[in-house]
Amino acid sequence: MSLWFWLLLACVLAYAWKLMGYFVPASLLQNPRMSRVAGTMTIGLLASLTIVNTVASGQVLAADARLGALAAAAIALALRAPFLVVVIVGAGTAALLRLIGWN
């Protein structure tokens, strides 16, 4: 089977999964427990995407300026800095690390 077949199958399955959301009863969506589960899953997915994008470069693991930027942003978050400051600290740290040669 070709790559196009698998790509189209993935598209159809993703769309079908999205349509399934319309069949979920409203009472289930208003349940506080379900709201906590959905919120926790969102945080977990975003955290895993952040880690994968930080330490992966193609098929290999990479320790470069992105790792330092993530650490600096985590420290800024721990110090309760505003989101814009966290982004600027992370970007500035990555720029400085690349400037000194840590690619």
Image (cartoon, rainbow, N blue to C red):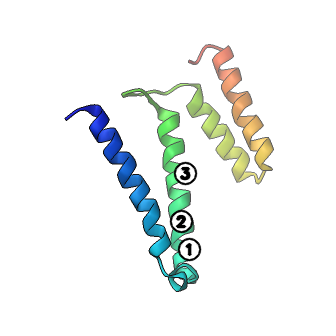
What residue lies at 28% left-to-right and 32% top-to-bottom? 3
Q: Amino acid at mark 2?
A: Thr
The crowd level at tag 3 (other Cα within 10 Å; few <14, some 14-19, many 20+) is few
Q: Quadrant of residue 43?
A: bottom right
Callouts 2 and 1 close, C-beta under 8 Å: yes
Callouts 1 and 3 close, C-beta under 8 Å: no
Left or right of 14: which side holds 87?
right
**Which residue is denoted by mark 3 in the rendering?**
46
Q: Mark 1 and mark 3: span between their CA atoms?
A: 16 Å
What residue lies at 70% left-to-right and 29% top-to-bottom? 93
* Among numbered discs 1 and 3, the one appearing first in the sequence: 1
What residue lies at 57% left-to-right and 75% top-to-bottom? 35
Q: Quadrant of the C terminus?
A: top right
Q: Any mark on residue 36, and which?
A: 1
Q: Quadrant of the N terminus?
A: top left
Residue 11 or residue 30, whichever sits in front: 11
Residue 22: x %, y % from top left:
49, 71
Q: Amino acid at mark 3?
A: Leu
The crowd level at tag 2 (other Cα within 10 Å; few <14, some 14-19, many 20+) is few
Residue 58 or residue 90, whichever sits in front: 58
* Circle 2: element type: helix
Residue 10: x %, y % from top left:
35, 47
Residue 14: x %, y % from top left:
41, 53
Q: Is residue 64 above or below residue 9?
A: above
Left or right of 71: which side holds 21?
left
**Which residue is denoted by mark 2 in the rendering?**
40
Q: Amino acid at mark 1?
A: Arg
Q: Is residue 29 above or below residue 77?
A: below
Residue 24 or residue 46, whichever sits in front: 24
